[in-house]
Amino acid sequence: MLTVDRFEGEYALIEYNRKIFHIPKALLPKGVKEGDVIKMEITVDREATEKKKQSVAKLADRLFKK
């Protein structure tokens, strides 16, 4: 269970399994408040990952071109 513990500046401090994580407030739903229990889903964007790999490979090719 993820619980909003408190807010500090631009971050929400989220408690999960007795540990506190700093999450940018911008990633949370509007209107979330201290004590709210939140759900989060994390997925891998395969398309964006592949584009990033290609971009890095192109940069490396340019940098290490003989």
Image (cartoon, rainbow, N blue to C red):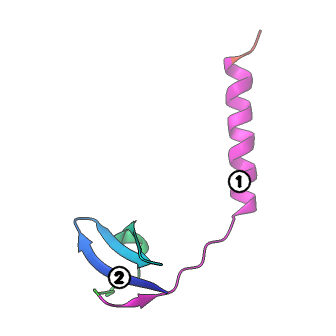
Residue drawn at (51%, 86%) of the image: 39
Q: Look at the image and give the residue range highlighted in magenta.
A: 35-63
Label tally? 2
Of the two numbered discs 1 and 2 in the rendering, the one whose residue sits closer to the viewer: 2
Looking at the picture, does residue 58 appear above or below residue 39?
A: above
Query: Does 7 appear in magenta?
Result: no
- Chain-order first, disc 1 or disc 2: 2
- Read off the residue under disc 1: 49
**Viewer-side residue, 50 vs 25:** 25
| Residue at horizontal 74 percent and vertical 24 percent from the top | 61
Q: Amino acid at mark 1?
A: Thr
| Coordinates of residue 32 in the picture (x, y in percent) | 33, 86
Q: Residue lying farthest bottom?
A: 36
Q: Amino acid at mark 2?
A: Val
Element at label 2:
strand
Position of residue 56 in the picture relative to residue 5 (left or right): right
Mark 2 lies on residue: 4
